[in-house]
Image (cartoon, rainbow, N blue to C red):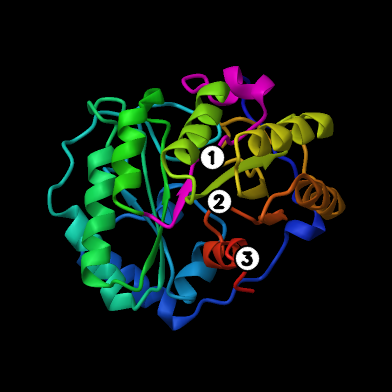
Amino acid sequence: MSAAVHKPKPVWLRRRLVLKSSANEVSALLRDLNLRTVCQGAHCPNQLECFGNETATFMILGEVCSRNCTFCAVPPGAHEPPQPDEPERVAEAVKRLGLHYVVITSVTRDDLADGGASHFAATIEAILSTRTDVLVEVLVPDFRGSHKGLATVLEAQPSVLNHNVETVSRLYPTVRPQANYQRSLRLLAEAKRLDPKIITKSGFMVGLGEKPEEVIALLEDLRRVGCDLVTIGQYLCPSKDHHPVVEYVHPERFDAYTQEAERLGFRGVAAGPYVRSSYKADNLYRKARGMD
């Protein structure tokens, strides 16, 4: 893969962020409890906004990944064993922040027999044992296709099961070489089979070189496996060594993708240049449940 060629950001991607004092408080709390967030690990452009609103997506199971996706800032590397007290530390952070909606994700852990599913379940259970009114969304890896791992997570009763397809099928060999498009679709389908009432969710990026008709086909595939919620955001290259930005997608095309997703029957859609899979996740959940 050639080094990314710098593309100047268009006007719709330029914005001024105001740092709230609460953002520093969230950062301090995370340091105090020795916790990680995907906001930091993946260089999320919404980090200051979310921290300022006292929200974060907790990243469990370490800070290095088993895989080497060319779009992602989370580095690959040697893993350490899961920390047994991490679920309780996440629950303590949820309690201190007074959160009512929590997103839990992880690096991919192909080195673990269950892919980290039991650690996800323990984290959900720790949160719900502390605060019964908290809604927990999990953004899970593919568990190498293990239905047993998925069942372990679902038995802990999250409110939303999220698994990102990330990009269109054609680009998997260059963007997600160790993942499998059909395997991700099967995971979402299996989640519905195991728990027909679970809200399922997926997300993907645009600007990686996909064609509009491939995006429509991806949306159709997600609906075919019963996916309820979808997020679509602009890919932003983390460094010169990552997959280059092929295109900055105009907001009007995001609007067109939103309309198509709604036509296909998604219960909630978030699409825009700065949308990420867990950005304002509680709003999408409420929409899916008819609470808006």
Asked if 165 appears above or below 53 in the picture, the reply is above
What residue do we see at 34% from left, 54% from top?
157
Q: Residue at x 87, y 53 (%)?
A: 252
Q: Nearer the viewer, residue 220 or 47?
A: 220
Please state if 221 lies on the left or on the right of 144 as rendered.
Answer: right
Horizontally, residue 179 falls left or right of residue 118, namely: right
Residue at numbered disc 3: 287
Give 138 or 175, whichever is nearer the viewer.
138
User: x, y percentage for residue 69?
Assistant: 49, 28
First in sequence: mark 1 vs mark 2: 1
- Which image quarter: residue 142? top left
**Distance from Cα at disc 1 to Cα at disc 2:** 8 Å
The answer to whether residue 34 shows anywhere in this view is: no
Q: Earlier in the sequence, mark 2 or mark 3?
A: 2
Label 1 Cα neighbours within 10 Å, binned few <14 / some 14-19 / many ≥20: many
Assess whether mark 2 and mark 1 are in contact (beta carbons under 8 angstroms).
Answer: yes
Q: Nearer the viewer, mark 2 or mark 3?
A: 3
To which residue does mark 1 refer? 164
Q: Horizontal and vertical percent for residue 278?
A: 52, 56
User: Callout 3: helix, strand or loop?
Assistant: helix
Quarter of image, res 242: top right
The answer to whether 208 is drawn above or below residue 32 in the figure is: above
Q: Quadrant of the C terminus?
A: bottom right
Residue 39 quadrant: bottom left
Direction from residue 273 to residue 251 in the image, left or right: right
Secondary structure found at label 1: loop
Say which element carries label 2.
loop
Amino acid type indicated by mark 1:
Asn
Q: Which residues are magenta?
A: 158-180
Residue 277, disc:
2
**Mark nearer the viewer, 1 or 3:** 3
